[in-house]
Image (spheres, rainbow, N blue to C red):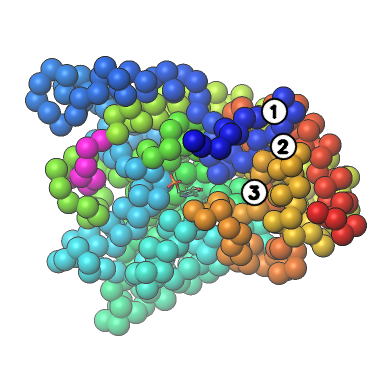
Amino acid sequence: MGGPAVSLASVSAYLDHAATTPMRPEAVDAMLPFLDVRFANPSGAHRMARDARRAIDDARDEVAELVGAHPREVVFTSGGTESDNLAVFGAARAGAPAITVAGGTVVCSAVEHHAVLDPVESLGGCTVAVDASGRVDLDDLAAVLEQEAAREAAGEGPGVRIVSVMAANNEVGTIQPLVEVADAVRRLAPHAVLHTDAVQAFCWTDVAALTAVADLVSLSAHKFGGPKGVGVLVAKGDITVAPRQLGGGQERGLRSGTQNVAGIVAAATAARLTAEARPVEVERVAKLRDRLLDGLLASVPGLVETGAVGGAAGPDRRHRVAGTAHVCIEGVESEALLYLLERSEVYASAASSCSSGAMETSHVLAAMGVAPDLRGGSLRLSLGWSTTDAEIDHALAVLPAAVEHLRAGGL
Ligand code: PLP
């Protein structure tokens, strides 16, 4: 017998959309027939198999249109992590004689998700600095690319094979200047592939604009109202990517393995609903986010909006996705605060979620230059399609008291 299911009480606030979103009901409805009567293997030859294959083709057409790509450029994967790994390893090893040999230098920003950062580090790559708001330092990027170009010209290095800069950060929500990044890459490393991890961007920005400047784009369905375990890698037509796994040759040979038909169909449905609602949702959610942040800044002494820049008119949140509110609270331990918040039915997180659920120190906050004692009190409140005014009211009612309680020595 399992434990009691967690259900959201009438007064509760799920503010962890950056970790995962609740599935949109229409996406659940879309996937159910493929778990039941339309269960066939899409690689088969009979009528039932053709039906499953057609469903994937339709989903591919839909996703392609939404991200400004050709259907052939849409590769379905098992999630954002696989899409990122396929992009980094696949581009680094494209054309290399063996699947384990890297063919060039790899570069990424210092604030990437581990799904990019760890592959880059394992290939001996390097990271580019960010400023205090978390945006890539374009001068540092240019310096890294120029240095690698000089090494290549001198016969001392293989040249840059891939540059990966995320579209929006998962911890603090910073939107990267991807057009400027692309401009630097095309000028200084014309043979490099540009990848962007748009996993946290899909809800808030038009991904077609990213596809227009990047060669590879990663998405994950569970971040936009779709199911877990489904991702997309958009791989532009002329880009060569070496597969990570070999087998049945599905997904143009780039991702062998029987496709998750139900998940792919649901992902396309969620993507369509998200894209259709985006203009209205960005405005609605940004207002909720601003109310939450401004309310917390006014009611919790020693609370700092992470990476906030701005002047007398207040913090400038233009380079933040609408759904993310990140703060650091002086004299408070994140773990204790999260525990208290959970007791009052406020669900949030400190940094990105990791498999153990344990706290890890944030490389993102460190790269942004947030002081170590402040980092210990980090709190991410992330909003999304299901977030309501009542949830924000609840969080605003609970949080100041929880901080006060902790500061008074309680738990
Ligand atoms: N990239 C970013 C920016 C993310 O936020 C996440 C998930 O948190 C991932 C990649 C990994 O995606 P998935 O959970 O689908 O593997």
SS for callout 3: loop
The circle drawn on residue 345 is 2
Measure how far apart labels 2 and 1 are at the Cα level: 7 Å
Visible in this render: residue 62?
Answer: no
Q: How many residues crowd around disc 2 within 10 Å: few (fewer than 14), some, or many (20 or more)?
A: many
SS for callout 1: loop
Query: What residue lies at 59% left-to-right and 62% top-to-bottom?
Result: 360
Query: What residue lies at 38% left-to-right and 33% top-to-bottom?
Result: 68
Q: Which residue is mark 1?
A: 9
Residue 270 lies within the magenta run: no
The circle drawn on residue 387 is none
In this rendering, the label closer to the viewer, 3 or 2: 2
Which residue is farthest left?
45
Q: Quadrant of the C terminus?
A: bottom right
The circle drawn on residue 349 is 3
Span highlighted in magenta in the image: 252-259
Of the image marks 1 and 3, the number of the one nearer the N terminus: 1
Three-letter amino acid code of the residue under disc 3? Ser
